[in-house]
Amino acid sequence: MTEVDAARIERAVHEILLAIGEDPERPGLQRTPQRVAEAYADFFGGLAVDPLDHLVDTVPIGETTAGSPATGDAVILRDLAFRSVCEHHLLPFVGIAHVAYLPGDRVVGLGRLPAVVETLARRPQLQERLTEEIADTLVTGLSPRGVLVVLDAEHRCVTTRGSRQERSSTVTIASRGALADPVARAEIIALIGAKGATTERDDPAAR
């Protein structure tokens, strides 16, 4: 895995500015190639990172009081903000990820799950593939009994060009193991949505 080649990006952006009929040397554009290179290093930094590295330090889940292996119920992280770039037009898509897994005999620190999402999102992506890659990484790294990943994102290639559907968002779901069962999956999805329902119920302004 290699780092982003900033100098090469700068040269390419300089050519793009010429190609659209602009003057790359005018004051407002002189540092644009450098700025774009810095932005791309951030957008695509996940190409140089193995997402499984975030799941190395797992913790045994332990035993029950009866001495049998504990299996644990679901671990759910809701509302993980993420940003990625659509590989078709190199325009951003931004949204929220919800990640759940049923532990096997090990768990991982909660901060490791957002790190997995961020690493995979910082690559040229399709939302559908990103959803699947997050699920597959958790399966490989944690050997859980089940995994569920839900992404809800707005795509700039949809909201700012073409059909310009400014209010649209895209939802994708990937499930593995026990959470591929429709009933179990529906239960986790209901728990994911429960936070929003609770917030609305408790907010007098929302009534």
Image (spheres, helix red, strand yellow):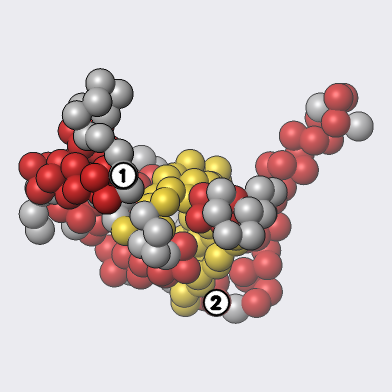
Specify the farthest residue to the top.
Answer: 27
Marks 2 and 1 sit apart, C-alpha to C-alpha, by 52 Å
Disc 2 marks a residue whose amino acid type is Ala
| 129 vs 16: above or below | below
Q: Which residue is mark 1?
A: 21
Disc 1 marks a residue whose amino acid type is Gly
Q: In the depicted view, which residue is nearer to us: 19 or 129?
A: 19
Q: Residues within 10 Å of mark 1 (few under 14, many from 20)?
A: few
Image quadrant assignment for residue 36:
top left
Residue 141 as seen in the image, left or right of residue 131:
left
| Of labels 2 and 1, the one closer to you | 1
**In percent of the image, x 80 and y 35: which residue is there?**
200
- Asked if labels 1 and 2 touch by Cβ distance under 8 angstroms, the answer is no
- What secondary structure is marked by label 1? loop
Residue 175 as seen in the image, left or right of residue 115:
right
In the rendered image, which quarter contains the N terminus?
bottom left
Q: Is residue 181 visible?
A: yes
Q: Which residue is mark 2?
A: 180
**In percent of the image, x 41 and y 69: which residue is there?**
129
Q: In the depicted view, which residue is nearer to us: 164 or 72?
A: 164
Label annotation for residue 42: none
**In percent of the image, x 25 and y 35: which residue is there?**
23
**In percent of the image, x 24 and y 26: which residue is there?**
26
